[in-house]
Image (spheres, rainbow, N blue to C red):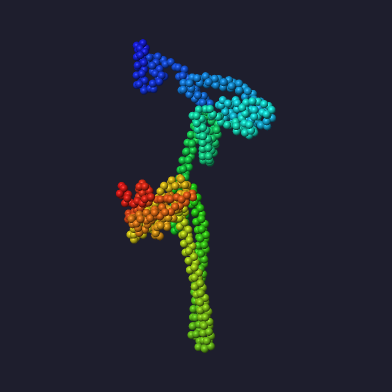
Amino acid sequence: MAANGPSMTASEIARETIKQMAVRRVEPTPDNYTQIYFEVAGKPVKEDAVGALRKALKQLPHDSLEQTNWINRWEKLLKQDNWQGLGELLTESMQQQLSHSTKWPKAIRTLLQAWDDKRSGVDIARKRETLERVLINFGNDESLSDKLIGMANHWLPSDAGGDGIPLTDGTETAAPLAAVEPASTEGLPSDVQQFHGAFTILQTLLKQTLQLGLIPRLEGYPDLQTEAVALQESTERAKKVKEWEALAKSLKALLMRVEVIGAKEDDVRGDIIDLLHLLLSNIGELVAEDSWLSGQVYAVQSIISGPLDRAKLKQAEKSLKEVVYKQGLVKHSLVEARNSFKTLISTFIDKLKYMGEASELYSGKIENYAQELSQTDDLIKINELVNHLMRDTSVMQTDIMRSRDDLLNQQRVATDTQQRMEKLQEELQQLSEVVRIDQLTGVLNRRGMDEAFSTEIARYRRSGELLSIALLDIDNFKMLNDQHGHAAGDSALKHLAGVVKRAVRPTDIVTRMGGEEFVVILPNTNLEEAVVTMSRLQRALTKEYFLGNNQKLLITFSAGVALFKTEDDVNSILARADQAMYLAKKRGKNRVMTEIDLQANS
């Protein structure tokens, strides 16, 4: 609002000013009172010296640390109302200006003299490199003239004299290093020093992020990699705010392009995994009868079904290499055994054929002898025929006995070969079982668990025997990994598996479902007995320590127990056991809960 000038007295304007200050809820300072007073009186606000200075300071550039420091000193002086320091600040500014006006001619003269001087042994290329570094690092610094004089004096021989601020007292190799030292922050306000320190740290972090994180990631994309290298170099040169704004804009554009490439690579990776899934599924169906090969197919399928992990891939590769090598040896022996068995069968058939031909020849001779005997009455002829018949019968008997011995020998060899083949087949089957075993803990892995479930569920449906399962989860496993390392976590898993295997019955089946979760299949066991078994395992576990990083550590687990029902399948009973296990976690951990507890809790 504005008054009508003469229509309001000074006291009325004062009262209206106080009223407006209350309505507007402004701080009751002399400056605010003066501004509203002139507004109510309808007169233009008279700008005092302090206001004019503050307005001018806000319009000054903040492109360098020196400029920011100089403005901060003025603002601090005005805020503290310290007019005694005004003279000192003006005197210092005037002396600096006079110093600059006298130092620059001297700096240029000394630089030209040193540039053309060849007695120092420093060539023009090295001089140019050092000069560029000084200009990059101190281009906006008030001490630039001093740095140039010190650099030039370093190039001049010691007998040439010259004054100024030397860059270093050491050798030539130290000169460039001294020339790029950042400006000292001593004497600056603490907040400015902290800002400068934080800025230096962030600049270094950005440089390292580009150098170690982004640039290697762009291998295979030369255009983007070149752009990232250019940005890294820009982080070393950027000093002014406008330069950093341009750098930030370029970095944002580059990251958006990298994000697009990353999305495409993720899609390609997903398509490759889907294709591999399809290929493995087809191979698995084709080799369903070859359990030793289907085991390897399943191992690869189980790896690509979850999150890809380099350590798991390497471990699986090592395990599969060992299995493939051993299976190769066994299969080679099996092929040899099969070939030997074929040879035996062929020999056996040849022997039978020979025996048949010999029998046929003997029968022919007997017929001839019978015919000749019926046609003669001569005793001498009859005696001769009998002698021939006895000789042929003896030969036939000898051949039959020899053939019988050969056949018996072939039978023994065939039996041995058959047993050898069965043993080799069993070895192949055992090697195939390697992919069903968790390599870390030695218990069944997820595939082994699925097969064990299939067997036990089939037995349940056939005989009606009770079947319970327990799902165990190590308590605070993530904290154990974080505090003691993944090696200690692996030791904890092996320790738990060992305790469980020693404590359960021979008919119980211990499996590792994944991570820190284990499943114990308990045939012919009701719910109460399963709870007793799990409680016994918890007591056994608390009595045994294990070493993690040479420290005695104690672990516990929470367990959920469920009883298999007619309408159940593997997923449904595991889901109930899992819910009961999480209920045990919520109730304080190191507990055993059942599906009945779930119903009571709902």
Instruction: Look at the picture and state if 63 lies above or below 4.
Output: below
Horizontal side of residue 589 vs 350, given as left or right: left
Instruction: Look at the picture and state if 187 lies above or below 294.
Output: above
- In x, y percent, where is residue 445? 43, 54
Q: Is residue 59 visible?
A: no
Which residue is situated farthest in the front direction here? 84
- In x, y percent, where is residue 495? 44, 53
Q: Residue at 41% across / 52% down in the picture?
A: 542
Q: Residue at 52% across / 83% down in the picture?
A: 390
The front one of 213 and 83 is 83
Instruction: Look at the picture and state if 408 lies above or below 186.
Output: below
Location of residue 2 (image quadrant): top left
Q: Residue at 60% across / 27% down in the picture?
A: 147
- In x, y percent, where is residue 181? 57, 31
- In x, y percent, where is residue 135? 58, 28
Horizontal side of residue 79 vs 155, given as left or right: left
- Number of on-image labels: 0
The front one of 31 and 88 is 88
Horizontal side of residue 298 vs 24, given as left or right: right
The front one of 250 and 139 is 139
Instruction: Look at the picture and state if 469 lies above or below 372.
Output: above
The front one of 295 and 66 is 66
Q: Is residue 134 visible?
A: yes
Q: Residue at 38% across / 16% down in the picture?
A: 37
> In the rendered image, which quarter contains the N terminus?
top left
